[in-house]
Amino acid sequence: MTTLDHDAAAATGRRLRTQEEVEAHIRAICFKTGPPERVGAELEWTLHHAAAPQAPLDVATLRRALGRHTPAVLDPTHPPDPLPAGGQITLEPGGQIEISSAPAPSLAALHAAVDADIEHLTALLDDAGLVLGRHGIDPYRSPRRLLDTPRYAAMERVFDARGRHGRTMMGSTAGLQACFDAGPAAELPTRWRAVQALGPPLVALFANSRRHAGRDTGLASARMAAWWGVDPRISHPPVGPPGDPAAGWVRYALTAPLLCVRRAGDCWDPPPGATLGDWADGALPDPLTAADVDYHLSTLFPPVRPRGYLEVRYLDCQPGGDWIVPVAILDALLSDRHITEAALELAAPVAERWHIAYSSGLRDRALRRAAEALTHLAGRHLDRSGLSAAVRNHVIETAERRLGAEEPS
């Protein structure tokens, strides 16, 4: 083990003896401020047999299809090879497949890399008779957990105590995540407020998950509805002082319920009702470490999650190459302090309309107006992205086509 490995192991294994130490650890890692230089994306899809999209998946078929890229959760004997452009394949509990891009220095570089990795993945799946889904939730099948791990088994039991949304979220949903640098410390509060306020109008604009398990849910985004319904303590936005985003995140993390507790054996069930704050106060027999806190943070799923960078989690999966459309709009709206301030002003009146966004989408007049104004604002600044003129035109034309698809109620 190298000196760096020893240092990393010591840092994650460090015992946190007081709640103050836990708070300090979370503050230290939630926002890494500095000039915004990188952008990334995580693309999830439901996965289907091309000849029978309603047929269930099985682990053996996935292993054969992915070959040397098979994630460790399916084949722990060999580390998976990255995709040609640097992306990594992971799997969600219901067999949804995900590409996590490498951080890119520009949106144009990200677009080229992700499209190359999608092309490679699509060819692998095609050879196995599999295809990527085109919606934010499985239109054909009910949720069924494919991955049998202590983490997902424990989470499922916790979710089941509250209702059906947890199983649906774990087993049926597919999102598009966009990742942006947190930005300079002085601009962080505005960027944090803006990227969350943009959620409802962009959820409405890019909602495409009305059908689930063979039925019409009547919802614009049944995917977002499932996430929103899991538990507000882990899936709704953090609330805190406007000028101190880290304070809100610290409080959110401490009061969130534990979904699983790593331990020897296959049962990772947490004590019923216990929170991270309870653990910090000594409610669990095992001492709390920095690694335990980091793992707990990975089980929190608000619409925007701070991971050093800003991880935007509220978008439905988009079909084919259309993933670039919402990512480019977000990138443009976050490309400059003045643009971000203008975007926040446009989105602020609808910033709390999450329920209306996933239920009614663009049929809501206020959300439609905000989405249209934000699309036009982004369109005026897309040239900063380095995307080709053809791709920029595609972004705006696709967004405008969606705006024209429904008349508001």
Image (cartoon, rainbow, N blue to C red):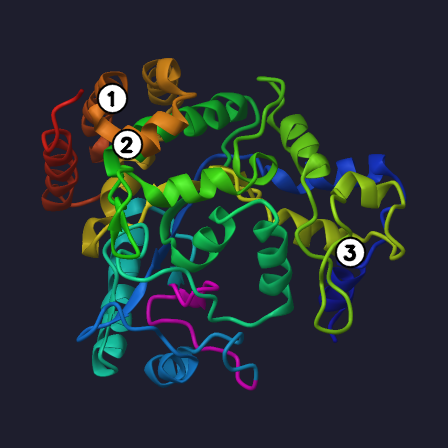
Which residue is at the front of the view, 373 or 389? 373
Q: Position of residue 67 (x, y in %)?
A: 38, 84
Height in image: 266 above or below 102? below
Numbered range of the magenta stretch: 77-96
Label 1 with label 2: CB-CB less than 8 Å: yes
Which residue is at the front of the view, 79 or 199? 199
Residue 336 in view in this figure:
yes
- Going by the numbered disc 2, the residue's amino acid type is Ala
Label 3 with label 2: CB-CB less than 8 Å: no
Image check: 170 left or right of 265? left
Q: CA distance from mark 1 to mark 3?
A: 49 Å
According to the picture, the residue beneath numbered tag 2 turns out to be 204
Label annotation for residue 364: 1
Residue in view at x 24 percent, y 33 percent? 205
Height in image: 34 above or below 298? above
Q: CA distance from mark 1 to mark 2?
A: 9 Å
Quarter where residue 348 is shown: top left
Q: Position of residue 88 (x, y in %)?
A: 43, 66
According to the picture, the residue beneath numbered tag 3 turns out to be 11
Label annotation for residue 112: none
